[in-house]
Image: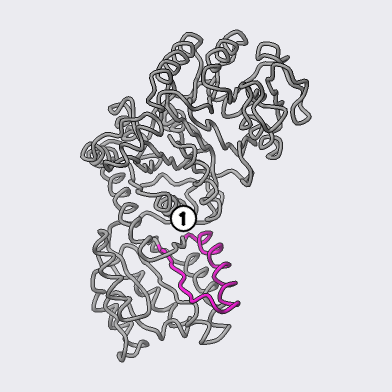
């Protein structure tokens, strides 16, 4: 659904009730589930500022919080209800929500349609009917729901930062939300809203897409999906959103075994691969095939400036490595053009011919023993009119062998390049090392944090960089073509936020 006051209250709740918050870690009378206790504990630890109301038929308090026997006995309006009771009891909880005038409910409980059992299918049909009758925004069942909204201090598991960011993640899988938030946080990705929607009895991926399309705190939308109830609606929404906010889609269940797993996970029909290929072509959505690719694509959109094409200049060291790098780029859809004669002539003025190649990839160990030469080479390759983007494969151990000042001088060089360059060409980095030297390890860690802030994302391997950069370039080509054909789409969308840090996605219109 589009933005609504009721649904917005779920993302910014003043009060949360947890049905299934047991006073112990063991189920009580087949009714209370330990997961509810975990949710309450995580909300308290994360500093949720509103009231948390455990709902328990007999307990007086849970985790020091006053417990209530029912939702309609809670003394204030509840903006979000988390349900963690056995599947047969969920219908009664929803009836209680209707009696209390509650509109937002997420059902953690499994054992519904995804089970494939007749009783589970019947129970899901029953709670769906009740939710529709009461106009309840039902998230799930079989999901973690609104699991992480840092600005609202809402988190249903531990170990997450309270620092918000521009990335939102809609996932049919609760496990993927847990993995991606922790993995992404380690790479410096910060989140706006993370949603697990499970079986999608009422609210589906399209409903959350509509909401996030107009959410000013969300600038990049990630989506993990196994099956979709309304394919034409998803296609239409993503096609409209993509020119304004990148939509990165990880489609699960594309192979035969994956389809079977999707059916048992969320009860979804995964769909044919050729249909999804058409979806990506028509909508401009950016495809990810794994959690790691999803994170690498987010890093690209967060930090890289838009390229004008697929032509890449590669600076590295190692003859065999340069051949493999060129093959890898070509296989993934990146062009590796020979540098212009003028660029080669100027490179040849300070790079000796023996044991080097100045055509592209630029393969010269001397550059990694003298940061001043590296600086000159970087600027020349970046200025070459045949190059749209750059990949720097930096071997830190070679710099270290040349001296500590060479190793530590790299950061300042790249900082100056990022601040002074007027070319606007994106630069990606891979930091190679053997890992044995303490100074190298420390500098690698420092550069991994510093370079993204300069607009130079750091990828774990060259192979991972070359997998995502062609898709990043293809997205920008799609945006240019779409905006050239139709300028009206942007007028209806929320304007992006102003920049908050150098090199970030904040404030970009993705054109």
71 to 179, vertically: above or below: above
Instruction: Find residue 232 and report its horizontal and vertical position in percent.
Output: 28, 27
Pick whichever, 494 or 254, lies toward us. Answer: 254
Q: Is residue 285 left or right of residue 408?
A: left
Image quarter of residue 157: top right
Pick whichever, 55 or 120, lies toward us. Answer: 120
Instruction: Find residue 168 and report its horizontal and vertical position in percent.
Output: 49, 40
Report if residue 431 lies within the magenta region: yes
Image quarter of residue 57: top right
Q: Which residue is depicted at the point 65% across and 14% down? A: 71
497 to 27, vertically: above or below: below
Quadrant where the N terminus is found in the figure: top left
Q: Which residue is depicted at the point 29% across and 77% down? A: 343
Q: Secondary structure beneath disc 1?
A: helix
Query: What is the image's colouring?
Result: one colour
Pick whichever, 439 or 116, lies toward us. Answer: 116
In the image, the segment drawn in magenta is: 427-455
Q: How many marks?
A: 1
Instruction: Find residue 134 and report its horizontal and vertical position in percent.
Output: 51, 10
Instruction: Find residue 164 and report its horizontal and vertical position in percent.
Output: 59, 43
Report if residue 254 lies within the magenta region: no
346 to 315, vertically: above or below: below
Image quarter of residue 12: top right
Q: Which residue is depicted at the point 34% across and 70% down? A: 383
The residue identified by callout 1 is 303
Crowd around label 1: few <14 · some 14–19 · many ≥20 (10 Å): many
Pick whichever, 51 or 216, lies toward us. Answer: 51
């Amino acid at each position: 659904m589009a933005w609504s006051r009721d649904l917005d209250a779920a993302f910014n709740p003043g009060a949360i009730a947890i049905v299934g918050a047991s006073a112990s870690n063991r189920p009580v009378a087949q009714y209370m589930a330990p997961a509810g206790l975990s949710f309450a504990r995580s909300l308290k630890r994360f500093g949720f500022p509103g009231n948390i109301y455990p709902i328990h038929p007999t307990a007086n308090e849970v985790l020091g919080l006053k417990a209530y026997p029912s939702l309609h006995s809670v003394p204030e309006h509840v903006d979000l209800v988390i349900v963690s009771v056995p599947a047969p009891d969920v219908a009664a909880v929803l009836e209680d929500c209707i009696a209390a005038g509650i509109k937002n409910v997420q059902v953690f409980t499994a054992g519904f349609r995804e089970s494939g059992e007749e009783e589970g299918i019947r129970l899901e049909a029953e709670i769906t009917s009740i939710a529709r009758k009461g106009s309840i925004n039902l998230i799930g069942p079989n999901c973690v729901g609104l699991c992480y909204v840092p600005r609202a201090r809402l988190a249903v598991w531990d170990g997450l930062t309270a620092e918000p960011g521009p990335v939102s993640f809609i996932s049919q899988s609760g496990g993927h939300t847990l993995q991606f938030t922790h993995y992404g946080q380690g790479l410096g990705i910060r989140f706006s809203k993370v949603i697990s929607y499970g079986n999608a009895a009422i609210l589906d991926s399209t409903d959350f897409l509509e909401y996030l399309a107009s959410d000013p705190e969300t600038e990049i939308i990630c989506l993990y999906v196994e099956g979709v109830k309304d394919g034409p609606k998803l296609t239409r929404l993503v096609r409209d959103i993509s020119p304004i906010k990148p939509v990165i889609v990880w489609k699960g269940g594309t192979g035969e075994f994956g389809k079977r797993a999707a059916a048992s996970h969320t009860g979804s029909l995964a769909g044919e691969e050729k249909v999804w290929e058409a979806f990506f072509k028509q909508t401009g959505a950016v495809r990810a095939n794994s959690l790691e690719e999803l994170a690498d694509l987010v890093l690209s959109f967060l930090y890289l400036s838009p390229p004008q094409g697929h032509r890449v200049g590669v600076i590295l060291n190692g003859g065999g490595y340069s051949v493999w790098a060129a093959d890898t780029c070509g296989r993934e859809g990146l062009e590796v053009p020979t540098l212009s004669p003028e660029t080669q002539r100027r490179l040849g003025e300070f790079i000796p011919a023996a044991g080097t190649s100045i055509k592209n990839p630029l393969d010269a160990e001397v550059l990694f023993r003298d940061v001043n030469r590296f600086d000159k080479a970087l600027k020349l390759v970046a200025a070459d009119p045949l190059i749209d983007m750059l990949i720097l494969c930096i071997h830190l151990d070679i710099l270290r062998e040349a001296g500590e000042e060479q190793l530590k001088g790299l950061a300042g060089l790249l900082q100056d390049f990022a601040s002074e360059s007027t070319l606007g060409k994106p630069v990606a980095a891979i930091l190679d090392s053997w890992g044995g030297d303490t100074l190298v390890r420390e500098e690698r860690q420092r550069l991994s944090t510093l370079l993204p802030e300069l607009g130079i994302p750091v990828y774990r391997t060259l192979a991972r960089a070359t997998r995502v950069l062609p898709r990043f370039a293809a997205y920008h080509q799609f945006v240019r073509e779409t905006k050239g054909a139709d300028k009206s789409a942007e007028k209806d969308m929320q304007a992006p936020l102003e920049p908050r840090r150098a090199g970030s996605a904040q404030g970009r219109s993705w054109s």
